[in-house]
Amino acid sequence: MTVPTPSPTTPRGPLPPRIGFLTVPLMINLIYSAITLLFLPFAGPTLTDTTSEMVKQMGIPDLTVTPAQVQTALWISFGLTTLQILWVYYTRRAVLDGRSWGRVSSIVLAVFSLLIPPIFTILGIVMLIGAFDKQVVAYTSR
């Protein structure tokens, strides 16, 4: 007789107490990015007005921003935000499943979060504290 092996998605043992230091900021980042993605289609007129005002203030008469350039910038932002949402979602799932790459990915996200003051800087610090907790490191060792 053989002992059945657990499925790869089943976490090993109970969740460590500080796993929330990783999963909660990742969820906040996920929600914030989703809201950003929802409001992105409405940013076109605001972006056009802002760039026109900046060009006037800089005093560069020959610089014009066409609607096609604004549309391209918005599509690039849409694509990058979508990739960020997928990255954060799969990182959070990997951390909850106890995978080591999820912890490493959350450290990278935490370092990037340090660059966005003030709220995401605090979330990045919290994530780094949780990522280097001994019990979290032991839990995410697969």
Image (spheres, rainbow, N blue to C red):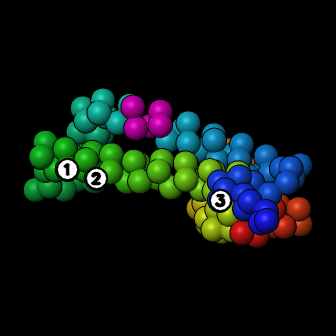
**Which-is-in-front pick, marks 3 and 2?**
3
Position in image of residue 43 (x %, y %): 31, 34
Query: Which residue is label 3 attached to?
Result: 8
Q: Up-down: is 40 above or below 8? A: above
Judged from the image, the secondary structure of the residue bearing numbered disc 3 is loop
Query: Which residue is label 1 attached to?
Result: 72
Check residue 94 in the rendering and tell me which mark sits there, or answer none. none
Position in image of residue 68 (x %, y %): 12, 46
Give the image quarter of residue 38: top left
Position in image of residue 30 (x %, y %): 56, 42
| Residue at 71% over, 52% down | 10
Give the image quarter of residue 2: bottom right
Query: Which residue is label 2 attached to?
Result: 76
Q: Is residue 32 left or right of residue 50?
A: right
Position in image of residue 79 (x %, y %): 32, 51
Q: Amino acid at mark 3?
A: Pro
Q: Is residue 29 left or right of residue 35?
A: right
Do the CB atoms of the residues marked 2 and 1 lie less than 8 Å apart? Answer: yes
Q: Quadrant of the N terminus?
A: bottom right
Q: Give the magenta part as a residue range.
A: 34-38
**Which-is-in-front pick, marks 3 and 1?**
3
| Residue at 63% over, 68% down | 101
Q: Amino acid at mark 2?
A: Ile
Whichever of callouts 3 and 1 sits on the residue coming sooner in the sequence is: 3
Asked whether 42 or 29 is in front, the reply is 29
Whichever of callouts 3 and 2 sits on the residue coming sooner in the sequence is: 3
Classify mark 3: residues with Cα within 10 Å, few (<14), some (14-19) or many (20+).
few
Asked whether 38 or 47 is in front, the reply is 38
